[in-house]
Image (cartoon, rainbow, N blue to C red):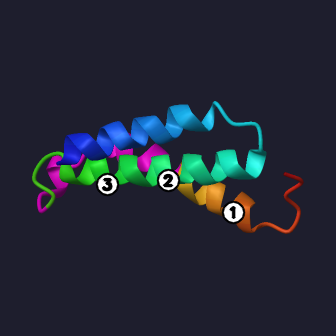
Amino acid sequence: MAEYVGYLASVFIVGGFLLKNLRTIRFINMFGCICFVIYGIFLNDYRDFNQWLWPVIIPNAILAFVQIYYLTSKNDKS
């Protein structure tokens, strides 16, 4: 099941590059990042932190928060 979440994440990330509206791109990218975080946690034994894919989880979690920040920011010109 985790592999499908990984594929879904990839579709969101690639699909975001096909769009022109910056706000929509951020929204789609945020979903892709969240899917990658879920993928990184559940690909192996999610109960064992040592088996989590930290190089996948950390940057995508940060990027998801960046997208949330810009989506909720009043200064966003998109």
Q: Which one is in front, 5 or 46?
A: 5
- Please tell me how crowded label 1 is: few (under 14), some (14-19), or many (20+) other residues with Cα within 10 Å: few
> In screen coordinates, is 51 left or right of 29?
left
| Other-residue count near label 3 (Cα within 10 Å), few / some / many at <14 / 14–19 / ≥20 | many
Residue designated by label 3: 38
Image coords of residue 42 (percent x, y)? 20, 53
Q: Amino acid at mark 3?
A: Ile
Percent position (x, y) of residue 10? Answer: 42, 35
| Label 2 SS | helix
Across and down, in percent, residue 26 comes to 66, 49
Mark 2 vs mark 3: in front: 2
- Front one among 45 and 10: 10
**Residue 51 among those drawn in magenta:** yes
Tell me, yes or no, whether the highlighted magenta stretch contains residue 56.
yes
Estimate the spatial distance between the alpha carbons at disc 2 and disc 3, rounded to whole Å: 11 Å
**Residue identifier under label 2:** 31
Residue sitting at x 69%, y 63%: 69
Image quarter for residue 67?
Answer: bottom right
- State the residue position of label 1: 69
Q: Amino acid at mark 1?
A: Tyr
Q: What distance separates the C-alpha of mark 2 from that of mark 1?
A: 14 Å
Q: What residue span does the magenta drawing correspond to?
A: 47-62
